[in-house]
């Protein structure tokens, strides 16, 4: 059964507003913890690698909706900064796998700390039970489990 369009549209509008609010609040906080000057895309690349490592470069590009050339340039920059490594796949030498270094993991922790601060502020007036329900719903939508 499909949801009525007005409910789906309302959800879409509110999700969009939440995403824009998070983005607007996160940008200055993330900049303060961006010691390696990787920028917003660099931060997203690092967090995506942590979620999927080791991840093939092509998959990483698809997960971030970027072309392979742009992703290759970002990965090379992050590798020069010592935040990740690239290595050929043992199963297929044509495939490049990307994973974080300990330094890269530390940057992800810093970015996630900034994100947690933003989300905490946004959800400040939301009751604990409602937060739990929201988290359960988000985990269901994203197919993830609680970390």
Image: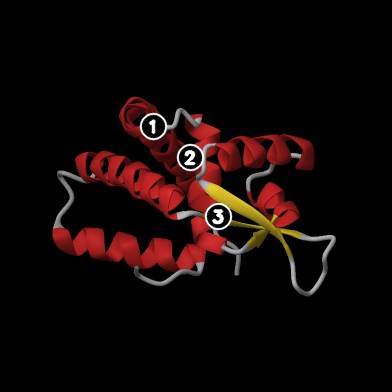
**Residue 133's x, y, as percent?**
28, 65
Residue at x 51%, y 43% (from the top left corner): 82
In this picture, residue 62 sits left or right of residue 27:
right
Q: Residue at x 46, y 69 (%)?
A: 144
Q: Is residue 76 left or right of residue 91?
A: left
The numbered disc on residue 15 is none
Q: Is mark 2 in CB contact (under 8 Å) with mark 1?
A: yes
Rendering coords of residue 64 (x, y %): 63, 45
Check disc 2 and report its element: helix, strand or loop: helix
Of 69 and 139, the residue lying toward us: 69
- Count neighbours of disc 1 (C-alpha within 10 A) and say few if under 14, some if 14 to 19, many if 20 or more: some
Q: Quadrant of residue 30?
A: top left
Q: Nearer the viewer, residue 72 or 144?
A: 72
**Residue ID for mark 1:** 34
Q: Secondary structure at mark 1?
A: loop
Q: Give neighbour class at mark 3: few <14, some 14-19, many 20+ (Cα, 10 Å).
A: many
Question: What residue does disc 3 label?
Answer: 49
Q: Residue at x 20, y 39 (%)?
A: 121
Q: Give me the disc on residue 43.
A: 2
| Label 2 crowd (10 A; few <14 / some 14-19 / many >=20) | many
Instruction: Kindly check if marks 1 and 3 are in contact, taking CB atoms under 8 A apart as contact.
Output: no
> Where's residue 104, x and y in %?
45, 48
- CA–CA distance in space, label 1 to label 3: 17 Å
Q: For the residue labelled by badge 3, is the local secondary structure a helix, a strand or a loop?
A: helix
- Mark 2 or mark 3, earlier in chain: 2
Q: Position of residue 125 (x, y in %)?
A: 15, 44
Q: Quadrant of the N terminus?
A: bottom right
Query: Could you tell me if residue 135 is visible in this image?
Result: yes
Whole-Å distance between the Cαs marked 2 and 3? 10 Å
Counting residues from the start of the chain, the first of labels 1 and 3 encountered is 1
């Amino acid at each position: 059964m499909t949801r009525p369009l007005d409910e789906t549209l309302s959800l879409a509008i509110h999700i969009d507003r939440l995403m824009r609010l998070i983005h607007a609040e996160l940008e200055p906080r993330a900049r303060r913890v961006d010691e390696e000057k990787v920028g917003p895309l660099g931060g997203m690349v690092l967090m995506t690698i942590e979620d999927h490592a080791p991840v093939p470069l092509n998959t990483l590009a698809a997960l971030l909706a970027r072309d392979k050339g742009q992703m290759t340039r970002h990965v090379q920059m992050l590798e020069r900064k010592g935040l990740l490594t690239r290595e050929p796949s043992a199963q297929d030498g044509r495939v490049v796998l990307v994973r974080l270094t300990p330094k890269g993991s530390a940057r992800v922790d810093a970015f996630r700390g900034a994100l947690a601060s933003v989300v905490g502020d946004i959800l400040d007036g939301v009751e604990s039970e409602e937060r739990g329900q929201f988290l359960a719903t988000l985990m269901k939508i994203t197919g993830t489990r609680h970390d």
